[in-house]
Image: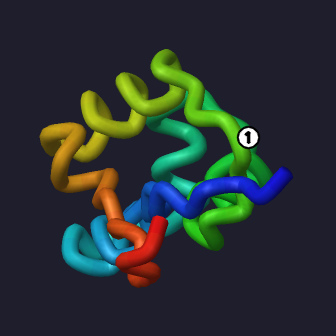
Amino acid sequence: METKDYGYIRVKLDELLKQRNLSKNKLAHRAEMQRTQINHYCRNEISRLDIVVLARICSTLDCRIEDLLEYIPSTNKND
């Protein structure tokens, strides 16, 4: 059975940190998160989004969820 390509969600945390001139270490401290977890979000190496983590990031960076996440639709029009 083939799986349908629905597109994917891109986490834009790395871009937000650069825009705000904030280090991953400072975010980790302020959001009470592990630096390794932030690295995974920055590199889009997560398979499940944690709403508590997303809330911490948005609160700490004073941003909206749509500033942090972007839906990239499938490029395959046949799906």
Identify the coloring. rainbow
- Image coordinates of residue 44 in percent, x first then y, are 61, 65
Mark 1: give few (<14), some (14-19) or many (20+) Cα within 10 Å.
few
Secondary structure category for the residue under label 1: loop
**Which residue has dot 1 on it?**
34
In terms of image quadrants, where is residue 11? bottom left
Q: Position of residue 25 (x, y in %)?
A: 60, 58
Task: Examine the rendered structure and indicate whether residue 34 appears above or below residue 53.
Answer: below
* Horizontal and vertical percent position of residue 26: 49, 53
| Residue found 57% across the figure and 34% down from its top | 49
Q: Is residue 6 left or right of residue 2?
A: left
User: Is 44 situated left or right of 17 in this image?
Assistant: right
Type of residue at label 1?
Answer: Gln
Q: Is residue 15 above or below residue 37?
A: below
**Viewed as shown, does residue 2 lie left or right of 31?**
right
Front residue of 61/9: it is 9
Q: Write down the quadrant of residue 72 in the picture.
A: bottom left
The residue under the point 56% across, 62% down is 5
Q: Residue 12's quadrant in the figure?
A: bottom left
- Residue shown at the point (32%, 52%) measured from the top left: 69
Q: Is residue 56 above or below residue 62?
A: above
Residue 36, horizontal then vertical, whole percent: 79, 53
Which residue is at a point 15% across and 44% down the rendered structure image?
63
Is 79 or 36 nearer to us in this picture? 79
Q: How many numbered discs?
A: 1
The residue positioned farthest toward the top in the image shown? 52
